[in-house]
Amino acid sequence: MGYLANAPRLDALIEGLESADSIERLQSASVAFRDFYGVNHVVYHWVNSAGEQYGCGTYDDVWVDRYLEKGYLRVDPVIQGCYQKFHPIDWKRLDWSSKAARAFLQDAIAHGVGNQGFSIPIRGPNGQYALFTVSHICSDEEWEEFTTGHRRDLILIAHCFNQVALQLEPGRAPDQGQPLSPREVEAMTMLAIGLSRAQAADKLSISEHTLRVYVESARFKLGALNTTHAVARALSRGLIVV
C-alpha cells in the first residue's frame, strides 16, 4: 500500500475533491484516492432523508450488480454494524459469526473487495446517512499499520466527500446551519482527541494562529459559547468522529 505518499499531493487531492461539481467528479476523486493510498477500493455511499441512495467508488460493476441481485444489504455486517455508530470501524471488529455473513464475505473477497476494510459512518442534516470505506487485500499487521497511520486523514476525506455530496443533492433544502469545512473538521478532531492547541497545530503542520482561525470559525458555525462547547456540539451532531 502506498501509505508513505507525500502530504502536498494529498492536499492537492483534497482541494480537487472540494471543488467537485458533479457525481462524475466525485467518482474520479474516489479513483484518485484509491491510487494515492495504493488500496484496492475507495467507496462513498449515502442515503438521504427520503431513502434515496447514490454513491461513487471503485468496486467492479459486476460486484455491485451481484450485491443488489443477492440482496446483500440485508446481511452485510458493514452496513448493519455501522448504522448505529459514530466512530470509524475496522471490519475485523464487526460480527461475522452468522453463516450468511461468512458467505457474503467469501463472495466479496472473490470479487476483489478485499479481506480488510475500514468504514467511517457520517451523519448529515435531515436524516442523511453516509458511509466512506477503504478496503484492501493484505495481512492484519499491514492493515493495522495503514489504518493507524492514516485514520485522521481518512476521517477528513470522508467528511469532505459528504460535504460535497450534500451540495450536489437534487432538490436540497437550504441547510439549517453552515457545514464545517474539511479543515475545520480536522482542527476540531485534533482538539476532540485531547491534544492541546500547540500539539494540534504541530500535528497538522500549521501555526497556532491558523489553528485558532479554524477553531473560531467552527465555533461560530456551531453557535457554541467556547471551544469545549463547540467540540461537544460537533461530536453530538456527528460532524467529527474520534
Image (spheres, rainbow, N blue to C red):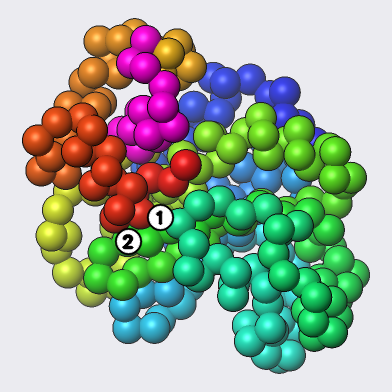
Q: Residue 30: horizontal and vertical position, in percent?
A: 59, 51
Foreground: 37 or 62? 37
Foreground: 168 or 97? 97
SS state under label 2:
loop
- For marks 2 and 1, give the CA distance: 8 Å
Foreground: 180 or 2? 180
Quarter of the image where one finds residue 143: top right
Say if the magenta span includes residue 195.
Answer: yes
**Neighbour tally class for label 1: few under 14, some 14-19, many 20 plus, Cα within 10 Å:** many
Q: Amino acid at mark 2?
A: Gly
Q: Residue 208: horizontal and vertical position, in percent?
A: 30, 10
Q: Main secondary structure of the magenta part?
A: helix
Which range is magenta?
184-198
The reply to whether residue 220 is visible in this rendering is no
- Where 126 sits versus 32, above or below? below
Quarter of the image where one finds residue 181: top left
Q: Residue 63: horizontal and vertical position, in percent?
A: 76, 75
- Where 131 sits versus 37, above or below? below
Q: Residue at x 14, y 53 (%)?
A: 177
Q: Residue 135: horizontal and vertical position, in percent?
A: 73, 54
The reply to whether residue 195 is visible in this rendering is yes
**Residue receiving disc 1:** 162
Quarter of the image where one finds residue 225: top left
Say if the magenta span includes residue 82.
Answer: no
